[in-house]
Image (cartoon, rainbow, N blue to C red):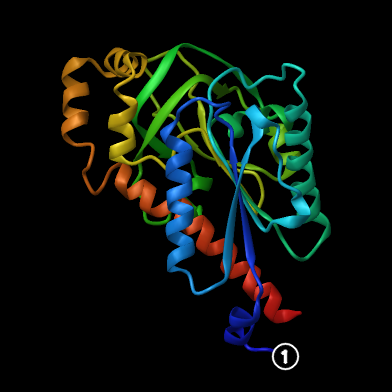
Amino acid sequence: MNTFEEIRTSMTNIRIALLDMNNNHVNQGFKNVLEISEAFRQHSEENISIETFDVRYKNQMPDPDAFDIFISSGGPGDPHREGLEWEGRFAGLLDSIFDHNRNYSSKKYLFLICHSFQLAAIHWKLGNICKRKSYSFGIMPIHKTEEGESEFLFRNLPDPFFAVDSRAYQFIEPDYQRFEELGMNIVAIEKFRPHIDLERAVMAVRFSDEIFGTQFHPEANPEGMLENLKDEKNKNAMIENFGVEKYLETLDRMDDDDKIMLTQAQILPRFLQSAVQKILRKAVTE
């Protein structure tokens, strides 16, 4: 049997597919996902390749058999189906990865962000994905559920932790029977406010051991946040959500080490590191 180090040095490639869901809109999120993935590749001892796919605008879709790790970004618009070809292909990718992991000992790893997270929740019929009363944009507290307390991607994050929230839609009223049927768990929700009679949105789901998704943006950094605030829609939404005083305070504290910089440094890098380690350990046993 080969040692772990021998497997590490002899493996040809670990292949990462990055799915751009922005539909040709300028967006900081995918840029950040690419930067995090590239930094991981450069600092890794493994042979790693990265390929990007413009899913919605160019109808590009990775072959599920050709990649080991997938990260699918956020993006604008209604997550419900409009009869476009890419929608069926993306649903097929979700099922292909989910079914592969149920039937084979070698696993594939998938991270779903914001719009992609909503698409998956709709596809697997997990609850009500509906339009918010108003657009949400800002740095929000994210609360761990009981299951989220043991979620390894959140291990070094406080409760609540902080992340960028940017969405016109929300995932509410989860179907807990469906979650149980599929073996999925809600691991984070919006800030719990018992004095406000509104359903708290689901903010993160552990879809399986290999598939994870967030409604928030774990890839966001202060530079991207400031760039997004040049858009009046985002600025006005943030002031509407927080008020002018809180908006100015948020700008002042945006680069605090314990806010979105901590979230960015933990979740996606930890997902990538864990996925690569598990792929290598599996290779060692074969």
Q: Residue at the spot x=34%, y=15% of the render?
A: 237
Between 27 and 185, the one nearer to me in the picture: 27
Q: Which residue is nearer to you in this view: 234 or 161?
A: 234
Kind of element beneath mark 1:
loop
Q: Which residue is mark 1?
A: 1
Name the amino acid type tagged 1: Met
Residue visible at 37% across and 33% down? 164
Q: Position of residue 153 (x, y in %)?
A: 48, 53
Image quadrant occupied by the N terminus: bottom right
Q: Is residue 91 above or below residue 32?
A: above
The total number of labels drawn is: 1
Q: Is residue 136 left or right of residue 254?
A: right
Q: Quadrant of the C terminus?
A: bottom right
Q: Residue furthest top?
A: 133
Q: Is residue 174 left or right of residue 199?
A: right
User: Which residue is nearer to you in this view: 110 or 26?
Assistant: 26
Question: Whole-percent x and y of residue 23?
Answer: 58, 26
Is residue 154 in view from this perspective?
no
Q: Quadrant of residue 196?
A: top left
Whether residue 142 is situated above or below residue 12 in the rendered picture: above
Point out residue 230 in the picture as x, y percentages from the top left corner: 29, 22
Classed neighbour count for the residue bearing mark 1: other residues with Cα under 10 Å, few (<14), some (14–19), many (≥20): few
State the residue lying farthest toward the right.
103
Please state the horizontal and vertical placement of residue 222, each as a whole percent of the image: 28, 39
Q: Is residue 42 visible?
A: yes
Residue that appears at 32% across and 16% down: 241
User: Which residue shows up at 37% across the image and 23% down it?
Assistant: 137
